[in-house]
Amino acid sequence: MIKHKGSSQRKNFYRKRHKRSIHWFFDLLDFYFRRKILGQKIPLLASFKLTYRCNLQCIGCPFHQRAKEDNSHMSWDQAIKALQVIKEYGCRIVVFEGGEPLLWKDGTHDFNELVLYAKKHFLSVAVTTNGTYPLNVPTDILWVSLDGVKQTHDRLRSKSFDMVWSNLKVTTHPKVLIHFTINNENWFELDKVVELIKEIPAVKGMTVQLFYPYRKDEESLTLSPSERKAALKKVIQLKEQGYPIINSKNRLEAMIENKWVC
């Protein structure tokens, strides 16, 4: 009897995925038991910034300006220690951020190696990227920032739209999500963006968050109360129309009243 290599590889893939799904189930069961029944304060998700280094200079983001500061770029040992601390707190999901996390490197260690380490210790590993580098990282979730149609995105994010769009069109990552940061220059383009991303099969949905200034000189992008209300009502409307908005309706409504606490 001849065994085909491709068939064997597929079986091995599905066997590993099934095993991980079972682990997911029991680990989450333990998490919710400890949190809901025992009343333990355990965070589900944690994120941290691997580096302040970035190839873009986006409006409203100060981190590229801090890239030369001390401790602006984690070493491999620091990153591993941070993951261990997050794990000890009971977190099940970790999100890598930056700067641009895909730029992260320490000696022979690169970002993909760090992701593979994290996947051994967390149920889900994600990254938020500006999308200008090839989207072939081994994370479970890949968030790509897109802050408007071409003209708006280019104005806000260093003329990077074409590069991001090209990478989105060719990625084979199994779970790509768009991350839209709502500010007073792009909130009225939400409907255009959800239509636009329908062109990309790899994109499974979109999350939104409100812009919050890190510094006083960035406050010009902040939504007024009326703009915030209009923008979030638009997001809820799009969600009810069937667009793949990941944020829950309850959370969006809490954000309208400025009652949502992260």
Image (cartoon, helix red, strand yellow):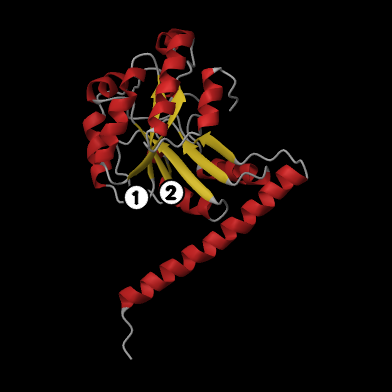
Residue positioned most to the bottom: 1
Q: Residue at x 31, y 23 (%)?
A: 157
Q: Marks 2 and 1: in contact by CB < 8 Å? A: yes
**Mark 2 highlights which residue?**
139
Q: Residue at x 57, y 53 (%)?
A: 121
On the rendered structure, is 32 left or right of 205?
right
Residue 194 placement (x, y as % from top left):
32, 32
**Mark 1 highlights which residue?**
173
The amino acid type of the residue labelled 1 equals: His
Residue 109 placement (x, y as % from top left):
44, 48
Residue 204 falls in which quadrant of the image?
A: top left
Q: Residues within 10 Å of mark 1 (few under 14, many from 20)?
A: some
Q: Give me the C-alpha separation between circle 1 and circle 2.
A: 9 Å
Which quadrant does the N terminus fall into? bottom left
Residue 183 placement (x, y as % from top left):
40, 17
Q: Say how many tags the image has.
A: 2
Question: In the image, is residue 199 above or below residue 261?
Answer: below
Residue 259 falls in which quadrant of the image?
A: top right
The amino acid type of the residue labelled 2 equals: Thr
Question: In the image, is residue 8 above or below residue 124?
Answer: below
Question: In the image, is residue 142 above or below residue 20?
Answer: above
Residue 196 falls in which quadrant of the image?
A: top left
Q: Secondary structure at mark 2?
A: loop
Which quadrant does the C terminus fall into? top right
Q: Residues within 10 Å of mark 2 (few under 14, many from 20)?
A: many
Asked if one can make out residue 81 in the rendered structure from this viewpoint, the answer is yes
